[in-house]
Image (cartoon, helix red, strand yellow):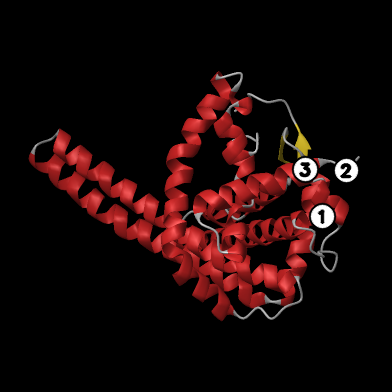
């Protein structure tokens, strides 16, 4: 039986083939990462300056300043997540077209970003508010999966598995968030079953690459010297962003392939059907 790592490595290689054929697809995750870093930088500077002023003048932070700082951070991270989701939607549509051997100009991606921006925002709100609450019910309430809500909206799946295909459903079938969640969960249930969880295994591989990208900075610190440290930090930053871009691209493209596999579209030009079938595996429930 193929291990999770072996299956993930195979699926990652097959996704990279698509990236090699259409390198322009990397524009979406690369732009997302660059914008996210810029937004984070812009969002953190005012918070830092405010904290410096507060501590220099009063030597303590009052409730108002704490709330302002917290709100600024919350807005910053919400915006970053929304931006990432929008660019992922663009990549998803282009990847789906490419896998089906259809024309996949970047223009389609940018059009879907504009068209689905508001819907994607509502999806992100659902994923960051309702999903954690549902996870608590899954863990603490033994009969959760048999409730009318779980069956109607999640097809009896755990919430994180149920929403796995929600993005390709939204962009390819023009669904609203709630309808996309129901459709995603039903596709997964009909294709892989109800007591399943993702078994892709790419995260471990990419985490290793991310860690390796820090080597130049570590070596620079060991050697010492300001110039050396700056160069090492720059190299590690570039490598880290490159690894993040590749990781995001592989995940999004593979999710698009899983969606096509679930709706019985031909994915054999790029993917091994057995590997896609093994992308989910049975597990015990009520485990967070």
User: Of the residues tagged 2 and 3, which is closer to the observer?
Assistant: 3
Q: Pointers 1 and 2 in contact (CB under 8 A)?
A: yes
Picture quadrant of residue 119:
bottom left
Q: Counting other residues with Cα less than 10 Å from the Cα at mark 1, is it few (<14), some (14-19), or many (20 or more)? A: some
Q: State the CA–CA distance, disc 2 to disc 3.
A: 17 Å
Left or right, residue 150 beside residue 53? right
Q: Earlier in the sequence, mark 1 or mark 2?
A: 2
At 42% from the left and 39% from the top, the residue drawn is 129
At x 58%, y 62%, the residue is 245
Vertical comparison of 132 with 200: above or below: above
Q: Please name the residue that numbered disc 2 is placed on.
A: 2
Label drawn at residue 10 = 1
Q: Which residue bears the numbered disc 3?
A: 192
Measuring 58% from the left and 57% from the top, which residue is drawn there?
A: 167
Q: Residue furthest right?
A: 1
Indicate which disc, 3 or 1, sits on the residue closer to the N terminus: 1
Decide which of 108, 206 is in the foreground and name it: 108
Residue at mark 1 to residue at mark 2: CA–CA distance = 10 Å
Residue 285 horizontal/vertical position (percent) = 68, 26
Q: Position of residue 34 (x, y in %)?
A: 46, 66
Relative image position of residue 240 (x, y in whole percent): 56, 58
């Amino acid at each position: 039986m193929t291990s999770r790592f072996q299956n993930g490595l195979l699926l990652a290689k097959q996704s990279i083939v698509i990236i090699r054929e259409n390198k322009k697809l990397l524009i979406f995750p690369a732009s997302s990462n660059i914008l996210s870093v810029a937004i984070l930088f812009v969002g953190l500077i005012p918070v830092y300056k405010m904290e410096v002023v507060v501590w220099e003048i009063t030597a303590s932070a009052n409730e108002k300043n704490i709330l302002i700082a917290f709100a600024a951070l919350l807005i910053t991270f919400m915006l970053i997540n929304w931006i990432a989701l929008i660019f992922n939607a663009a990549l998803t549509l282009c990847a789906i077209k490419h896998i089906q051997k259809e024309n996949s100009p970047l223009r389609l991606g940018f059009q879907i970003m504009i068209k689905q921006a508001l819907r994607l925002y509502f999806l992100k709100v659902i994923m960051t508010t309702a999903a954690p609450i549902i996870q608590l019910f899954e863990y603490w309430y033994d009969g959760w999966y048999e409730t009318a809500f779980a069956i109607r909206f999640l097809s009896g799946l755990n919430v994180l598995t149920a929403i796995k295909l929600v993005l390709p459903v939204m962009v390819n079938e023009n669904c609203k968030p709630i309808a996309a969640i129901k459709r995603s969960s039903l596709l997964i249930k009909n294709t892989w079953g109800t007591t399943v969880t993702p078994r892709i295994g790419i995260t471990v591989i990419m985490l290793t690459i991310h860690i390796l990208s820090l080597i130049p900075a570590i070596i620079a610190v060991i050697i010492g010297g300001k110039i050396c440290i700056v160069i090492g930090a720059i190299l590690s930053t570039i490598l880290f962003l490159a690894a993040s871009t590749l990781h995001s691209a592989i995940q999004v493209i593979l999710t698009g392939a899983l969606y096509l596999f679930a709706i019985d579209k031909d994915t054999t030009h790029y993917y091994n059907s057995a590997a896609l079938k093994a992308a989910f595996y049975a597990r015990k429930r009520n485990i967070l």
